[in-house]
Amino acid sequence: MYKIPPGTLFLGKNLLILPECPSTNTQAAELSQAGKAPEGTVVITHHQTAGRGQRGNTWESGKGLNLTFSLVLHPVFLTAGQQFQLNKAIALAIHDVVKNYTEESVRVKWPNDVMINNKKVCGILIENQLTGDRLSRSIVGIGLNVNQNEFDSPTATSVSVHSGKPIELGKLFEELLQSLEWRYLELKKGNGLNHDYLDALFRFNEPHKYILSETEVEGIIRGVDDYGRLVLEIENNLRALDLKQIKFVY
Ligand code: BTN
C-alpha cells in the first residue's frame, strides 16, 4: 500500500514500512543515531502502539485506519532561534493536502495542529537536535486521522468524516510527502512562509475566548513572533505567549 514516492527528490526514497511499532519518532531517532537514516528517511507503521504526543501526551490511532509516520530531516540551514519555521512548513504542507479532501474549513491551529472546523485532524511532534546553534537533526512525527470515525476525544476528527468517503492511505501518503518536500525546500531556499501561515491560521484576527493563568479572557490572535510565540491582543495590548501560558476555549 505504501511505496517509495516517484514524485519526490529525496523525501521517502529511504522508506521503512513497519507492520507495528511503539513510536515511529522513536524508531526514526534510533535509526538516525545509528547512522542508518540519511536525510529524507521516512518511517511509517500500520499500527503504532505507544504513540507520543506533545507535552508528554500519548497519541492514539486505530490500527490500519490512519497515517502515523516520521521524517528524518537535517535542517542545518536553521538556527536554534529559527526552529519554529520548520513547524510552520510542516503544518502548512499538511494543511495544503487536507484542504483538497473537504469543502469544510481546514486551518492550522498554533503552534502546529491541523484542524477541520473546530476539531483536530492532525498532530505533529517535532524533536530537534542542536549542534552548536544549528538544527542538525529533526525527527518530524505526523499523526493524521484519515479513516477513523470514532474517537475517545470529543475534539478529534478525521479526513474521511469530512470528505464523506473512505480514503486510500497510500495515495494520501504520497501527496503528503510531495507537499512536505516542497514546503521544506522552499524554506531551505529562504522563501518566507509567514504569509501563508497567517493565511491558514485558525482564529486569526477573530475575537475568541482563551484561558490565561486560569482566567478566561477575550483575545484576538494577531500573529506569531520570530520565536514562535502566539501574539494575542487583549484589551488593546499585545502579549506574546508560549504553549504553557494559553488554552483555547471552544
Ligand atoms: C500531538 O500531540 O498533537 C502530536 C502528535 C504526534 C503523533 C505522531 S504519530 C507519528 C509520530 N510518532 C509518534 O510517537 N508521535 C508522532
Image: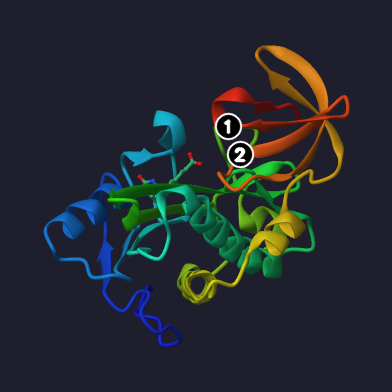
The image position of residue 118, as x and y in percent, is 74, 41
Residue at 13% over, 63% down: 35
Q: Is residue 109 left or right of residue 238?
A: left
Residue at 35% over, 49% down: 128
The image position of residue 235, as x and y in percent, is 87, 24
Q: Nearer the viewer, residue 121 or 65?
A: 121
Residue at 65% over, 26% down: 247
Q: Secondary structure at mark 2?
A: loop
Q: Secondary structure at mark 1?
A: loop
Q: Residue furthest front?
A: 132
Q: Is residue 8 left or right of residue 153?
A: left
Q: Amino acid at mark 2?
A: Arg
The image position of residue 210, as x and y in percent, is 74, 25
Q: Sequence-wise, which precedes: disc 1 or disc 2? A: 2
Q: Is residue 62 above or below residue 170?
A: above
Q: Nearer the viewer, residue 232 or 18?
A: 232
Q: Nearer the viewer, residue 169 or 233?
A: 233
Q: Which residue is mark 1?
A: 242
Is the Cβ of the residue at disc 1 closer than 8 Å to that at disc 2? yes
Residue at 46% over, 86% down: 7
Q: Amino acid at mark 1?
A: Asp
Q: Is residue 126 above or below residue 214?
A: below
The image position of residue 151, as x and y in percent, is 56, 38
> Which label number is shown at residue 229?
2
Q: Quadrant of residue 72?
A: bottom left
Disc 2 residue crowd, few under 14, some 14–19, many 20+, Cα 10 Å: some
Q: Mark yes or no: residue 164 visible.
A: no
Disc 1 residue crowd, few under 14, some 14–19, many 20+, Cα 10 Å: few
Q: How far apart are the two marked residues, 1 and 2, measured between alpha carbons?
A: 5 Å
